[in-house]
Amino acid sequence: MSTVLQLARCLDSRPSIPKAPGVALRNFSHAEPPSDIDRWLELRRQAFARERLGVRHWDRDDFEREMLAKDWWLPDRMWLVETPAQDDTPSRLVGAVTLAMRGKGEKSVPVVHWLIVLPAWRRRGIGRLLMATLEAECWNLGFRQVRLETHLRWQRAVQFYERLGYRPSP
């Protein structure tokens, strides 16, 4: 039995973008100091550190290979959620998601790629904000279905996606 669950959601209207208090949404930036790559890698490491079904640690080379080197990757299709900088405390990434495209041309399919929210920041609307932003972009691009993959053992993630309207897909 496969441990990967494939889900899809049909979009019947452009999703509205909810608010998540205390955080800001922005796109990935190559120029943002410190490096958004390093900040994303740390977010990913922290978010998956306690998962029973572990996620292999990534480094900058992995990010390059799995994101930047892909022909579908665009910085304006990677969204980051961060806390505001205050006094001597820099902003902190607390969530991220990337829109990947599978297939070519007319057969392209939008896919949720690495939705990540820090455990301490879950259930505050950040996941919904990120997913609605990604889905609205899909709508703007003319797509009416979004797909994703997750692990069957990540029950909180599966339940979250189901609450958003995602259903099993072949």
Image (spheres, grey):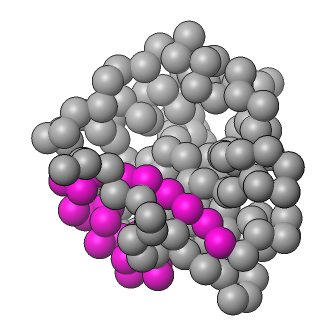
Residue 91, position in %: x, y? Answer: 56, 40
Q: Is residue 165 visible?
A: yes
Q: Is residue 121 magenta?
A: no
- Which is nearer the eye, 64 or 92? 64
Residue 106, position in %: x, y? Answer: 84, 57
Residue 17, position in %: x, y? Answer: 67, 76
- Furthest-bottom residue in view? 12
Question: Tag count in the figure?
Answer: 0
- Which is nearer the eye, 127 or 13? 13
Span highlighted in magenta in the image: 145-165
Residue plotted at (65% across, 72% down): 145
Question: In terms of image quadrants, where is residue 61?
Answer: top right
Residue plotted at (69% across, 89% down): 12
- Which is nearer the eye, 53 or 34? 53
Left or right of residue 32: residue 55: left
Residue plotted at (36% across, 30% down): 45
Q: Is residue 29 visible?
A: no
